[in-house]
Image (cartoon, grey):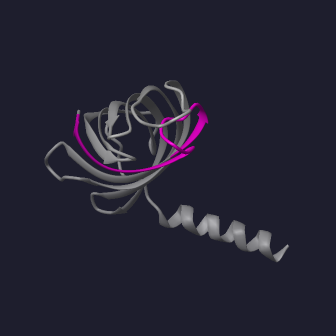
Amino acid sequence: MKKLFFTVALLVGFVTIVSAQEVSPHAIGIRTGDNDGFGAEISYQKKMGDINRFELDLGFRDNKNFDAWKLTGVYQWIWNIDGGFNWYAGFGAGLGSWNNKTFDNVDDGLFVNAVGDIGVEYNIDNFPLLISLDFRPEFGIVNDFGDNDLGLDIALGIRYQF
């Protein structure tokens, strides 16, 4: 019972301390990162509520072992840290195709991933630019590209808000 009370008190305190930053209705830009090879994505964010948004990324990955393209959708919650600084977390899924270059006994083809997302962003005052840095673990569900079922993606995003 003490653990339940402590957990509820902690959640109530967290909710009252954290205030939401206004989420832009739309943002479009690029997201570049490294998950077993350099990748770049066209990234679009759509406001879903006062503290939520949906992000859709279409991009490619390339390294010496494979080439891949993927489409990823992530539902995110945004919380204000201070001023224009926010942090966000979310979950989603990815779908793509990859071409094996060197792995033995590994098939090319379609893959499906489950993804998580956590990051920080800065909303520049008086200029519609959003800069973010996020960590996105990707868990292979069906025929994940590469040599394992877990990809750890760290990426820098730059988006124009409108």
Residue 35 position, x and y percent, is 39, 47
| Residue 88 against residue 74 in the figure, above or below | below
**Residue 13, position as x, y percentages in the image:** 58, 69
Q: Is residue 142 magenta?
A: yes
Left or right of 135 on screen, residue 114: right
Residue 25 visible at all: no
Task: Residue at 71% x, 66% y: name it.
Answer: 8
In the depicted view, which residue is nearer to us: 40 or 51?
40
Q: What is the quadrant of the N terminus in the image? A: bottom right
Magenta stretch secondary structure, dominant: strand
Viewer can see residue 35: yes
Q: Where residue 112 sits: x, y (%)?
A: 55, 30
Q: Position of residue 2 (x, y in %)?
A: 81, 77
Residue furthest to the left: 127
In this rendering, would 2 be left or right of 84?
right
**On the rendered structure, is 3 left or right of 129?**
right
Pick whichever, 149 or 40, lies toward us.
Answer: 149
Q: 149 above or below 88?
A: above
Residue located 14% across and 46% down the image: 127
The image quadrant where one finds the C terminus is top left
Look at the image and say whether residue 134 sits in the magenta stretch: no
- Residue range of the region highlighted in magenta in the rendering: 138-161
